[in-house]
Image: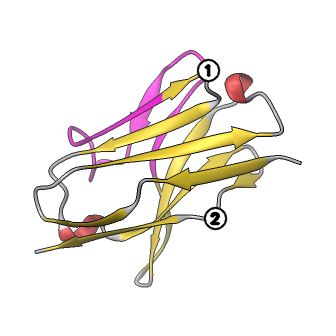
Amino acid sequence: QVQLVESGGGSVQAGGSLRLSCAVTGIISSSYVMGWYRQTPQKQREMVAWITPGGITDYAASVKGRFAISRDHGENTMYLEMKTLKPEDTGVYYCNMDTYWGQGTQVTVSS
């Protein structure tokens, strides 16, 4: 059974940092493109960042320069380092790989 489990969310003040993790079990993730998405009540789920098996990355314009996506093939885990957080970064962050999704982790940024 394939599972993606996010962790690392929480509440921070604007300007703060958080590091999200996505641990994959049940399958080797190294052959897949993986990504982070976020969803707020006001918006549809949007792509935040993605990373290829070879480490090529791309970001939503709103987070470029503040967020960094990475992955550790040995640990079967993907990360999202988030810095200089803004209130508009608030949302539920989901890990994605192919058709698989994690359960989401809440990030709340207060002004």
Residue 68 forms part of the magenta stretch: yes
Image quadrant where residue 42 sits: bottom left
The location of residue 69, given as percent across then percent down, is 41, 35
| Dot 1 or dot 2, earlier in sequence | 1
Name the residue located 74 percent from the left edge and 43 percent from the top edge: 98
The location of residue 74, given as percent across then percent down, is 63, 18
Q: Residue furthest top?
A: 54
Front one among 72 and 98: 72
Instruction: Specify few, some or many for label 1: CA neighbours under 10 Å numbering under 14, 14-19, or 20 or more.
Output: few
Q: Would you name the residue on which mark 2 appears?
A: 103
Q: State the quadrant of the C terminus.
A: bottom left
Name the residue located 64 percent from the left edge and 32 percent from the top edge: 33
Q: How is the image coloured?
A: secondary structure
The location of residue 52, given as percent across then percent down, is 57, 26
Name the residue located 50 percent from the left edge and 49 percent from the top edge: 36
Q: Is residue 29 above or below residue 102?
A: above
Q: Residue furthest right?
A: 1
Front one among 44 and 92: 92
Q: Is residue 12 above or below residue 42?
A: above
Q: Horizontal placement of 20 versus 32: left or right?
A: left
| Amino acid on which disc 2 is placed | Gln
Whole-angstrom CA distance, mark 1 to mark 2, is: 21 Å
Instruction: Specify few, some or many for label 2: CA neighbours under 10 Å numbering under 14, 14-19, or 20 or more.
Output: some
- Magenta stretch: give its range: 48-70
Q: Horizontal placement of 10 versus 84: left or right?
A: right
Q: Horizontal placement of 71 versus 111: left or right?
A: right
Which type of secondary structure does the marked residue at label 2 adopt? loop
